[in-house]
Amino acid sequence: MSGQRTLIRNIGLLLSGKLEQPILDADTVLSVDGKITQIGKAADIDESGVDTIIDANGVTLAPGLIDSHVHPVIGDYTPRQQQLHWIDSTLNGGVTTMISAGEVHLPGRPKDIIGLKALAIASQRWYENFRPSGVKVHAGAPVIEHEMVEEDFKELANAGVKLLGEVGLGGVKDGPTARKMVEWARKYGIQSTIHTGGPSIPGSGLIDKDVVLEAGTDVVGHINGGHSALPDEQITCICESCRAGLEIVHNGNERAALLTLRTSKELGCLERVILGTDGPAGSGVQPLGILRMVAMLSSLGDLPAEQAICLGTGNTARVRDLDCGIIEVGRSADFVLMDQAQHAPGATILESIQLGNLPGVGMTVIDGVIRTQRSRNTPPATRLPLIVSRPSNA
Ligand SMILES: [Zn+2]
């Protein structure tokens, strides 16, 4: 792909993913070779040599949604619920990037050190080499065990591993050991998260606020539990006592999610709140999970919809250090185009979301390439983007 130019014009509402300025005054976005190069009014954009032209037909363009918490295993198959094409299904829910919190659903997952390192490296590779339906899956997230030494983290980092799986899903469930290993991981550029709350399935354990705070991971994984949340006072204490990302998941306690949202608003740190599904999990695959979290937090949490979308895009990109998630020159041309769902109440798409309704996804674009058109999973969008032209080989 060299010099591939993709133009999206006639955008009715442009959502940036940036909490400090969620709505942009522009109607056209140009990308070249998968990166955004121009954002503005149609008249100001250089349309020469464009390969793909999309007429947004007045719909809303937002950054592709990011799921901060998934448990992929291999390709587009999950052994957890014996489902095929769950990632493709989630792309139909507007998600273009996923972050693994550990490939823990692999039957017979190795827990010896050489085995868990091999699994992490292999998982990182097979999702780097194969993107299901184009979705960017950042995987290869080892679950720490007691026998690990600093050299293991150095070796993992050198091999391309950039994430730790949820601390607490393995043998390490105590604060001091977790802290030591999280610091080793950080030293070598590996980001960390932790399983917050009660056990998720038989075999996992409780991680309470003391362990979360002592471990000091970069992200407080499912602060609203997955499924069982910590008591309210422990959740507010975590929000107040650290600077880590506060991850809310679909597969958690909704009341605790709203408590986290309210607390972060009161503390003035909404930029720390990020969204995930925790799928596939005991409650299944959640193809619309991020959109459902956006609608739930916006409606019940009294958060303007354009800000709620930032929690699942720009906030996650910043906390996770990703080059997508924000409509900004230089970033990945990963987009979701959506419109108010047919017959959903509300004067605008934003009002409709704030009334608790899901928008209808009309198209997804990853690296400037059209990946899906009308979603097979969301309620149907009122208006759909139109493809004016696209390369004959696409
Ligand atoms: Zn978990």
Image (tube, rainbow, N blue to C red):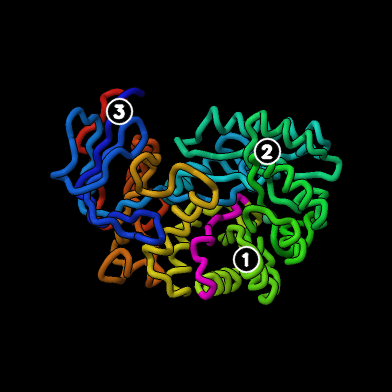
10 Å neighbourhood of mark 1: few (<14), some, or many (≥20)?
many
Is 334 inside the magenta-drawn segment? no
- Amino acid type assigned to the residue bearing label 1 in the image: Asn
- Up/down of 357 relative to 321, above or below: below
SS for dot 2? loop
- Distance from mark 1 CB to nearest ligand 1 atom below 8 Å: no
Give percent across and percent down for residue 258. Answer: 54, 72
**Residue in view at x 29 percent, y 61 percent:** 342
Q: Is residue 288 left or right of residue 81?
A: left
Of callouts 2 and 1, the N-terminal one? 2
Q: Nearer the viewer, residue 229 or 361?
A: 229
Location of the C terminus (image quadrant): top left
Name the quarter showing ligand 1: bottom right
**Residue in view at x 78 percent, y 33 percent:** 151
Give percent across and percent down for residue 390. Answer: 25, 31
- Residue where numbered disc 2 is placed: 188
Q: CA distance from mark 3 to mark 1?
A: 42 Å
Location of the N terminus (image quadrant): top left
- Residue where numbered disc 3 is placed: 4
Q: Which stretch appears magenta?
A: 266-280
- Residue where numbered disc 1 is placed: 224
Give percent across and percent down for residue 294. Answer: 45, 63
- Amino acid type assigned to the residue bearing label 3 in the image: Gln
- Amino acid type assigned to the residue bearing label 2 in the image: Tyr
- Up/down of 221 relative to 110, above or below: below
Q: CA distance from mark 2 to mark 1?
A: 29 Å
SS for dot 3? loop
Using the image, tell me which numbered label, if any, was put on residue 25. Answer: none
Of callouts 2 and 3, the N-terminal one? 3
